[in-house]
Amino acid sequence: MKNTDSTLEKELIRSYLEGNLSSLQKLIKKHENRLFSYIFMLVKDKPLADDIFQETFIKVINTLKSGRYNDEGKFIQWIMRIAHNLVIDHFRKSKKVSYVNNRYDESDVFDNLFIADQSVEDKMVRSQIYQDVKNLMNNLADDQREVLYLRCYAGLSFKEIADQTDVSINTALGRMRYALINIRKMIDEKNLVLTT
């Protein structure tokens, strides 16, 4: 499956470079939800996430057109790395440090989850659990929250996470371990029940 995806992506890139604009649209469509969710998780601001998302694909287009794209791995890893760097650039330029924001945002990643065939009570309980998990994640250190998100929500392997965040696999594993330890501590401290 992975080889098929990779082959398809290479074909779409080649087709785009030969002038077929719809090929790039297919690539964007394939990865847009995962990429936007990742950006939004980092910046916690929908308009800013939209801007960085668009800027990411402008950079992708410019790199592809200039012939500088080096197809060494998955396309998604490459575009997520570009987005990651753009987020870092944004925070450097604005001299901000990413802060914890516990308010409920209508466009949050968890709100996009589909809950089928559940009673109103089940939906309310599930919604509260998601809110509790979001709050717990928001209280983690940025590097721990990032690795937890990339592993659990973006579905990346620890090798992919290490490549994405420019750290060793051991560091990525360590951050995940500390994230889980810290979440367990917070669950105990707050006496939360995270089951339906």
Image (cartoon, rainbow, N blue to C red):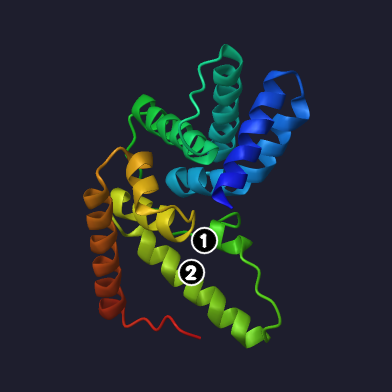
**Does 196 sit above or below residue 173?**
below
Task: Classify mark 1: helix, strand or loop.
Answer: loop
Task: Classify mark 2: helix, strand or loop.
Answer: helix
Could you tell me the amino acid type at mark 1?
Tyr
Q: Residue at x 32, y 60 (%)?
A: 139
Q: Residue at x 39, y 27 (%)?
A: 89
Mark whose residue sits in front, 2 or 1: 2
Could you tell me the amino acid type at mark 2?
Gln
Q: Nearer the viewer, residue 146 or 174?
A: 174
From the viewer's perspective, is 131 left or right of 189? right
Q: Residue furthest top?
A: 66
**Does 60 sit above or below residue 97?**
above
Q: Residue 131, which numbered label?
A: 2
- The crowd level at tag 2 (other Cα within 10 Å; few <14, some 14-19, many 20+) is some
Residue 124 locus on image (x, y percent): 59, 80
From the viewer's perspective, is 170 left or right of 65? left
The answer to which of marks 2 and 1 sits earlier in the sequence is: 1
- The crowd level at tag 1 (other Cα within 10 Å; few <14, some 14-19, many 20+) is few
CA separation, marks 2 and 1?
8 Å
Disc 2, disc 1: CB below 8 Å?
A: yes
**Does 121 sit above or below residue 64?**
below
Q: Nearer the viewer, residue 46 or 80?
A: 80
Give the image quarter of residue 113.
bottom right
Q: Residue 104, which numbered label?
A: 1
Residue 13 locus on image (x, y percent): 64, 28
